[in-house]
Amino acid sequence: ALKGVIFDLDGVIADTAIVHHAAWKKLAAEIGLPFDDNVGERLKGVDRRGSLDILLEHAPHAYSEDEKEALAARKNDYYRQQIESFGPQNLLPGARAAVESVRRAGLKTALASASRNAPLLLERLGIADLFDYVVDANHISRAKPDPEIFLAAARGLGLAPGECLGVEDAAAGIASIHSAGMRAVGIGQAQALAGADLLLPDVAAFDISRFTT
Ligand code: G16
Ligand code: MG
């Protein structure tokens, strides 16, 4: 039976997918690289360095390690500037209610975020106490689509992967959930989420009774 739900943060709970997107787009323009929605979609859920590598796929020349470090730091500065002013108003509509409904149904809740900024965001959004366990990029060594982060979340909840459900807005996240041996709920319209077991337009449409009855 289902005993826990593991939520992604950016794009599921927090309205930050658009902020990451804008920061990468700004960086791409500055260094003269193409950036369209297709690239934007591929970056979702992928960690900072992995995202940069995708962005640089079409770069006309190679970048040194130091240059890559600097570019990743620059993108993070743009992102941080935006979330500096974040508060509970930046939760996605229905996000708090969705997590609370899971708790009320007697299930455990965890957060699995590829972001190193997750602790700051959780604090700003005022939702840290909604989760029984939190795993972010600071705790793991292999990024989504590797299953490590969702497996760590299940372990933290004291549950078997098969007892958990993952909720994600990114293709890399759905892949991570599935390789962890969990069922996946996709949030959004993207073609890239077609592999999800259930696809919902937004987190407000998440209804835990669909899985418990
Ligand atoms: C998020 C975003 C990604 C972002 C990644 C790393 O993951 O979806 O777009 O690149 O975190 O973020 P940072 O640069 O803040 O460490 P998630 O898993 O919460 O969707
Ligand atoms: Mg996400």
Image: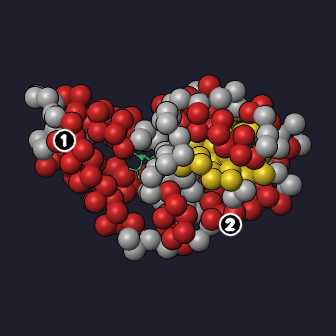
Identify the image quadrant of the C terminus.
top right
Whether residue 154 is visible, yes or no, is yes
Amino acid at the residue labelled 1: Asp
Please give the name of the residue rendered at 40% of the width and 74% of the height, measured from the top-left corner: 85
- Helix, strand or loop at disc 2? helix
At a point 30% along the width and 32% down the height, the residue shown is: 54
In this rendering, does residue 171 appear at all?
no
Q: Does label 1 or label 2 sit earlier along the sequence?
A: 1
Which circle marks residue 40 in the picture? Answer: none
Is 141 or 21 nearer to us in this picture? 141
**Where residue 36 appears, x then y in whole percent?**
27, 39
Depicted 100 relative to depicted 137: above or below: below
Which is closer to the viewer, label 1 or label 2? 1
Where disc 1 sits, the SS reads helix
Q: Residues within 10 Å of mark 2 (few under 14, many from 20)?
A: few
Q: Are marks 1 and 2 in contact (CB under 8 Å)?
A: no
Mark 1 and ligand 1: say if the CB distance to the nearest ligand atom is below 8 Å.
Answer: no
Depth order, front residue of 58/61: 61
Q: Residue at x 34, y 39 (%)?
A: 49
Label 1 Cα crowd, 10 Å radius (few <14 / some 14-19 / many 20+):
few
Instruction: State the separation of the CA atoms marked 1 and 2.
Output: 38 Å
Pointer 1: what residue?
66
Question: Which residue is under mark 2?
Answer: 129
Task: Please tell me in which quadrant of the rendered image residue 16 appears.
Answer: bottom left
Q: Amino acid at mark 2?
A: Asp
| Image quadrant containing the N terminus | top right
